[in-house]
Image: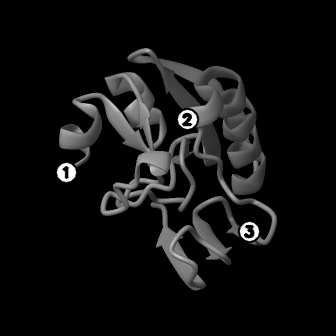
Amino acid sequence: MHALLMGNGTDHEDHDGLNNRRENLRPASASEQGYNKGTSADSTTGFKGVHFHKQQKNFHARITVNGKRHELGQFNTVPDAARAYNEAAKKYHGEFAVLNDVGDHDLILNQGYQAVVTLTGTSQNDSHKISRRHK
């Protein structure tokens, strides 16, 4: 529907693909549309741009800009890695940045292999617990 209103290369500001009001649509390149996506469904940490490195037993933050992946660093906690991603996203993705909500998150790191992250106030406005075991 949005392609009929504004043509191809359109992005939904509120992330709701069914909200095709003109004030919610904005022109966007393919890269900008990618920046505006949330956390992947197969994320092991529950945060965009953050993954657990099994061999090093720490968390890595990375961001993709114009099709190129940039490593942002290694961190002992998920929130620290998520904050690093947020800073880079603001800088490189601008108005299309989707930021991690790290305000209400707790991390328990047990012997470097188990991470338990409690998510509160996700984009779906529900609270839930994600538990991942990294081996």
Q: Secondary structure at mark 1?
A: loop
Point 59% across, 27% down: residue: 93
Q: What residue would you read off at disc 1?
A: 1
Q: Amino acid at mark 1?
A: Met
Q: Circle 2 — which element?
A: helix
Residue at the location (55% across, 35% down)? 96
Of the two numbered discs 3 and 2 in the rendering, the one whose residue sits closer to the viewer: 2
Could you tell whether 104 is left or right of 51 in the image? right
Q: Is residue 66 above or below residue 74?
A: above
Measured as percent of width and height from the top left, residue 31 is found at: 39, 24
> How far, Cα to Cα, is label 1 from label 2?
21 Å
What residue is pinned by disc 3?
107
Residue type indicated by callout 3:
Leu
Q: Residue at x 53, y 46 (%)?
A: 51
- 69 vs 123, left or right, is left
> What whole-number distance in Å separates the C-alpha atoms at marks 1 and 3?
41 Å
Q: Considering the numbered disc 3 on the image, is that residue within a helix, a strand or a loop?
A: strand
Would you say the residues marked 3 and 2 are in contact, meaning their CB atoms lie under 8 Å apart? Answer: no
Q: Residues within 10 Å of mark 3 (few under 14, many from 20)?
A: few
- Position of the C terminus, as image quadrant, is bottom left
Residue at (22%, 29%) from the top-left corner?
Answer: 8
Looking at the rendered image, the disc whose residue lies closer to the viewer, 1 or 2, is 1
Q: Which residue is mark 2?
A: 96
Crowdedness of circle 1 by 10 Å Cα count: few (<14), some, many (20+)?
Answer: few
